[in-house]
Image: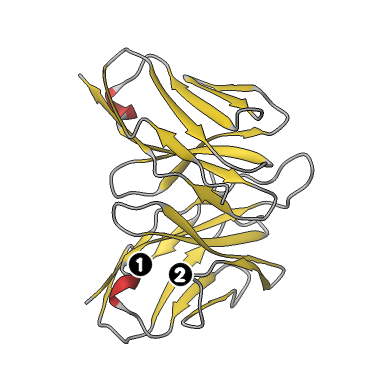
Amino acid sequence: EPEVTQTPSHQVTQMGQEVILRCVPISNHLYFYWYRQILGQKVEFLVSFYNNEISEKSEIFDDQFSVERPDGSNFTLKIRSTKLEDSAMYFCASSPIRTEYGGDTQYFGPGTRLTVL
Amino acid sequence: SQQGEEDPQALSIQEGENATMNCSYKTSINNLQWYRQNSGRGLVHLILIRSNEREKHSGRLRVTLDTSKKSSSLLITASRAADTASYFCATDAWDYKLSFGAGTTVTVRA
């Protein structure tokens, strides 16, 4: 069964450094998402991406964050200058084309645990 | 916010028993999805129920949706040790993002 994959599984970085989290969505999916989960808290939406542009973003997704689909398979989240409070599990998700009949199930990857020191 | 809120926060049951957890939300939705998360791991999609559906089954899972009460329930029948996990409801309000609740932590005792 196709899966969303994410690399690395764990990333440790120093405050102020840039990090890039990578995701390979399911191959025929068209919608891509990033969520994060701070330890012990709810999963929070960050951004959705369709047709090579951001569809929606949350208040968390400020100028320090950016997303890119550099080729036909990868989807990346970049945090330009990491802060301690960016420490969290970051999940990538993807879904197929949305119609009135469905296509809106979001399939999540295993996550990247980001630790900012 | 149309975030789902699960109830109870934690549930401990004996293997073989049924586990029921509830989710409430605030605004109208397109669909509601249930996910499972094993400790520190990824989110596994369990089931999606649309706003025009009232009940759905998948294996040992049964989900109900009452849009008039803005609530959903997830029933796991004949629980197993492997069902030990956190369970989250997430609502989709046609805006291409899921709003998650805080989750119910289920412990199945052998």
Q: Quadrant of the C terminus of chain A?
A: bottom left
Q: Chain of mark 2?
A: A
Towards the viewer: A102 or A37 = A37
Image point 46% across, 82% down: which residue? Answer: A64
Residue bearing mark 2: A22
Q: Is residue B107 above or below residue A52?
A: above
* Marker disc for residue B68: none
Could you classify mark 1 by the number of other residues whose Cα lies within 10 Å: few (under 14), some (14-19), or many (20 or more)? Answer: some
Marks 1 and 2 share the same chain: yes
* Marker disc for residue A8: 1
Q: Whole-Å distance between the Cαs marked 1 and 2?
A: 7 Å
Q: Which x, y percent locates residue A47?
A: 56, 66
Towards the viewer: B28 or A2 = B28
Q: Which x, y percent locates residue B72?
A: 54, 29
Question: Tag count in the figure?
Answer: 2
Q: Check whether the beta carbons of the residues at disc 1 and disc 2 lie within 8 A of each other.
A: yes
Could you classify mark 2 by the number of other residues whose Cα lies within 10 Å: few (under 14), some (14-19), or many (20 or more)? Answer: many
Q: Quadrant of residue A28?
A: bottom right
Image point 50% across, 78% down: which residue? Answer: A62
Towards the viewer: A102 or A9 = A102
> Helix, strand or loop at disc 1?
loop
Image point 55% across, 59% down: which residue? Answer: A25
Q: Amino acid at mark 1?
A: Pro
Image point 33% across, 63% down: which residue? Answer: A88
Q: Is residue A107 above or below residue A55?
A: above
Q: Amino acid at mark 2?
A: Arg
Q: Quadrant of residue B110?
A: top left
Q: Which x, y percent locates residue B23?
A: 49, 33
Does A99 sit left or right of A71 as displayed?
right
Q: Which x, y percent locates residue B54?
A: 66, 23
